[in-house]
Amino acid sequence: MSDPNNYTVGWISAIEIEYAAAQEFLDEEHEGPRLAHQNDENHYTLGRIGKHNVVIAVLPRGDNGVAAAAMAAKDMMHSFPNVRVCLMVGIGGGAPSKKHDIRLGDVVVSVPTFSGTGGNQGGVIQYDYGRTIQERCFQGARYLNRPPRALLTAVNGLSTKYKRRGNDIDTTINNILQRNRRLQREYGRPAPDSDKLYSSDPVQKPGTEAKLIERPERSEMEDNPAIHYGLIASADGFMEDAQIRDILAEELDVLCFEMEAAGLMNSFPCLVIRGICDYSDRHWFKEWRGYAAMSAAAYAKALLEAVPAGDVDRMQTIKDLLPPELMEKAKHFIAPLWDEKGKEAISG
């Protein structure tokens, strides 16, 4: 059985479809952990990607959201004390706009961005879902910690490589599916005409469908799937309102909505990688979930291959960054979303 002390990179999947995709991208798979902490409820897959030993965890079936992700990371810390950096890899809802041509199967990576208004400082913003939906603008929102420097450096290097030569994510996925034909139906790329973006404008007559937005096919010179870098919004609720999606995307230049990242970012050195499986509205495209999970995992693998092992080894372990007594209480992962007077608190 594998020695838990040998693993320095954590990888967290929220659901089964993400967990299976992650396993397919291991260069080699190791035997299960020789020993796990008595209070650890995670299921693990161990292996190697490039020069890194990676431990992949999945949340319990039926559990999702901020608290569930926080508990999974806490358990990983106990059983794998030398983990130094964590990736949150899976699917999410895109926020396409005139500025960002986001399509199904694309990948969004949580990185700091800067603009005339200061930009975002961490790559992930946590917000109060219920109040935000009610008020139709961000409520109780705050930026979370920056990803580790070593990962951001690798992101920049990989982005430059893709700019010059394009990415090979689709080819990589196809190669995996050729080796494992059992996954082709669920994880293969759906037909292009199944990628449909509907207008967020209110429908004129009750019971009628929203207008379909016409978008040209990507040319052979464009990456498909494409990689987008910027802000991911995280809360305990699915974004399913296209009008509010567009309002929030315009307000803070959000590219993606998801439900787990806020459970990790302020306590763990973490980067969030999301494959786009829907457009954060009431239209769900279940046939895209498998491919989106694969595209996110493919990017995560390419990223780890670009991170020198020495850069990770020089980082503090997660266990050293936060005292164990704090880790025992899930509430310490979830910082207050607003101050005592209920005022929204967007801060760096």
Image (spheres, rainbow, N blue to C red):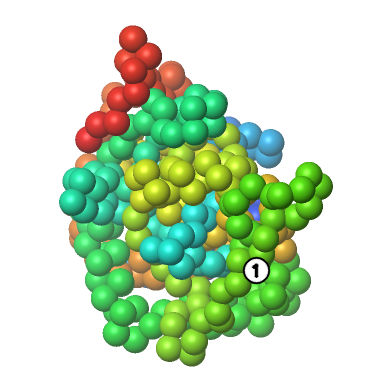
Query: What residue is rendered at 60% in x and 72% in y?
Result: 214
**Residue furthest toward the bottom?**
220
In percent of width and height, residue 215 lies at 56, 74
State whether residue 154 appears in this view. Answer: yes
Q: Position of residue 274 (x, y in %)?
A: 49, 56
Classify mark 1: helix, strand or loop.
loop
Q: Nearer the viewer, residue 222 or 309?
A: 222
Q: Name the residue carrying label 1.
A: 195
Disc 1 marks a residue whose amino acid type is Asp
Is 212 situated above or below 167? Answer: above
Q: Nearer the viewer, residue 82 or 24?
A: 24
Looking at this view, name the residue that lies furthest to the top: 340
Residue lying at 43% horizontally and 48% vertically, measured from the top left = 249
Could you tell me residue 271's position as x and y percent? 36, 51
Foreground: 309 or 89? 89
In the image, residue 37 lies at what x, y percent?
A: 49, 31
